[in-house]
Image: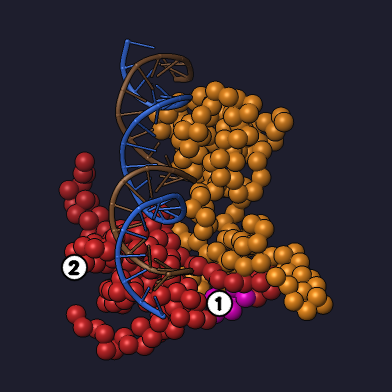
Chain colours: A red, B orange, C blue, D brown
Amino acid sequence: MTAGKERREEFDVLDEYLSKNGLKHSKQRETILQHFLETSGHMTVDDLYRVIHRKHPGIGRTTIYRALKVFCDAQLADAIELRDGLTRFEHKFRHAHHDHMICVECGTILEFVSPDIERLQDEIADAYGFDIESHRHQIFGRCQKCTRLQSLQNKKRKKKTSRA
Amino acid sequence: MTAGKERREEFDVLDEYLSKNGLKHSKQRETILQHFLETSGHMTVDDLYRVIHRKHPGIGRTTIYRALKVFCDAQLADAIELRDGLTRFEHKFRHAHHDHMICVECGTILEFVSPDIERLQDEIADAYGFDIESHRHQIFGRCQKCTRLQSLQNKKRKKKTSRA
DNA sequence: CTACATGCAAAATCTTTGCACCCCG
DNA sequence: CGGGGTGCAAAGATTTTGCATGTAG
């Protein structure tokens, strides 16, 4: 897992942010950033904690919470909240803005972007004299796989005429 | 506060939902529904609890949590979650679907609807074979009032040349 | 009379804080 | 060295659950 090379830039961004803000570089922050970068998708603090704590039992949850907050401030990470009460983090550096579709069945998170929606959104805000800072647009439903699975099960149910 | 008459229909909806589902009518549910209907905007459980508990000290938080869940199931209420970790409830009956703009300064919540955005959203979901069940689209920023206030303060700051 | 409803307190969850100790700059 | 960083345990905050008791149907 030496993803260090191709991610050099992210480490530089962190170091720059730290020194510019009178914060300090630490072995823990580096380790956490490394694992954050190596983990794909939309991880919770606990996802990250489990992976990191196995290899580095010295690093506690609190430090991960604090590191992720720093990463967000440094524009390396973005926090998103779905409907399960957990905060998830995703890569922000080299990852343009997007919104999410979340499968309520399997939890898969799809990303989408729509310049048209963003434009309409700006127009609406304008009409209200509202100054946009950020937004989130989340669509909940069933992904293609789960929709197919469901219709398959419906067919089976019909054949058996009834079920439970 | 006898808002009972013009809200009769909502009470009927509740009663119908209760009897259809083998649930029971109770004085508490009626009281909570009454106050829910009389409260405008986007209330938290605690907002409602404080109002109700003052007049009806016998009604506890738990009952309000449970009643609001029932109201949501009965399509009388809708739960929304912004970014402060609190669940808010709004009227759903006679209140068409809409999304929210939230002022990060004063907390004001504006509602908006955009058929165009909804249509684009459907098209995107379609393209992914995603079957939409619900969505939420929240825009965070500053409302007109707060934006004006801010630019006013900026002018003052400029005149004084510096500040803190 | 039975099953659902209620209310209190305790539990469960996720996240933040207090504090003693450690380490970077 | 000094001020931030870390880690543990404890505190916070919101929501849920267990359980004994009340009450609608």
Q: Could you tell me the amino acid type at mark 1? A: Glu
- Please provide the residue range marked out in magenta: A116-122
Q: Could you say which quadrant of the image residue B158 lies in?
A: bottom right
* Above/below status of B75 relative to A126: above
Q: Is residue A103 left or right of residue A81?
A: left
* Above/below status of A61 relative to D16: below
Cβ atoms at labels 1 and 2 below 8 Å apart: no
Indicate which disc residue A118 carries: 1
Q: Could you tell me the amino acid type at mark 2? A: Lys
Mark 1 or mark 2, which is nearer to you?
A: 2
Quadrant where the N terminus of chain B sits is: top right
Residue A79 lies in the magenta stretch? no
Q: Position of residue B60 (x, y in %)?
A: 51, 29
Residue located at (76% from left, 66% from top) = B149
Tell me, yes or no, if residue B61 can be seen here: yes
Q: Position of residue B52 (x, y in %)?
A: 61, 31
Pick whichever, A129 or A49, lies toward us: A49
Q: Position of residue C16 (x, y in %)?
A: 46, 55
Give the distance between the C-alpha atoms of the residues marked 1 and 2, in whole angstroms: 42 Å
Indicate which disc residue B27 carries: none
Secondary structure mostly seen in the magenta stretch: helix
- Is disc 2 placed on a helix, strand or loop? helix
Residue located at (41% from left, 75% from top) = A24
Indicate which disc residue A55 carries: 2
